[in-house]
Image (cartoon, rainbow, N blue to C red):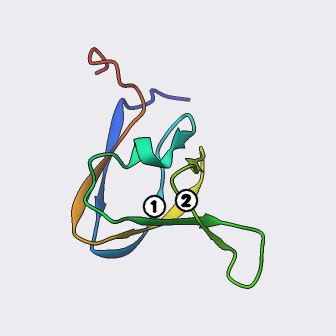
Amino acid sequence: AGRVPCSATLALRAGWNLVGVPRMAPVAVTNATAGLAGPLRIEGYSGEAPYHLQAQGLPATLEVASAYWVHSPVDQLWTVVNDPDPACT
């Protein structure tokens, strides 16, 4: 139990980053990564061998309580928004 933050800022480093997406609802990859320097490559868990990874392309959705590998071309900050209402504090 507790209060859900309006947003969270994650530090992405150039190269691969393992990121737990701090959202309370699923979000489209394109919406979640808007404004980030690209190209980004995002991979998530897949039950298929041998690597159990699946590229998360443009129509994909980032799911709640999931982690993803994010490849960033540069060091950058990623702000993940839970509540877009400007009055959220």
On residue 67, the disc is: 2
Task: Count the marks.
Answer: 2
- In-front residue for pair 47/67: 47
Image marks 2 and 1: residues in contact by CB distance under 8 Å: yes
Measure how far apart labels 2 and 1 are at the Cα level. 5 Å
Callout 1 crowding tier (Cα within 10 Å): few <14, some 14–19, many ≥20: some
Location of residue 37 with respect to 33 vertically, above or below: below
Residue pictured at 22% horizontal, 61% vertical: 76
- In-front residue for pair 82/74: 74
Asked if residue 67 lies left or right of residue 89, the reply is: right
Callout 2 crowding tier (Cα within 10 Å): few <14, some 14–19, many ≥20: some
Q: Write down the quadrant of residue 34 in the picture.
A: top left
Residue pictured at 65% horizontal, 66% vertical: 45
Q: Quadrant of the N terminus?
A: top right
Q: In which quarter of the image is the C terminus?
A: top left
Q: SS for tag 2?
A: strand
On residue 51, the disc is: none
The single residue placed furthest to the front in the displayed view is: 58
On the image, the x and y values in percent for residue 19 come to 45, 61
The single residue placed furthest to the top in the displayed view is: 87
Q: Write down the quadrant of residue 46 in the picture.
A: bottom right
What is the three-letter code of the residue carrying label 1?
Val
The single residue placed furthest to the right in the displayed view is: 48
Q: SS for tag 1?
A: strand
Q: Write down the quadrant of residue 51 in the picture.
A: bottom right
Location of residue 78 with respect to 55 vertically, above or below: above
On residue 19, the disc is: 1
What is the three-letter code of the residue carrying label 2?
Ala
Residue pictured at 51% horizontal, 43% vertical: 28
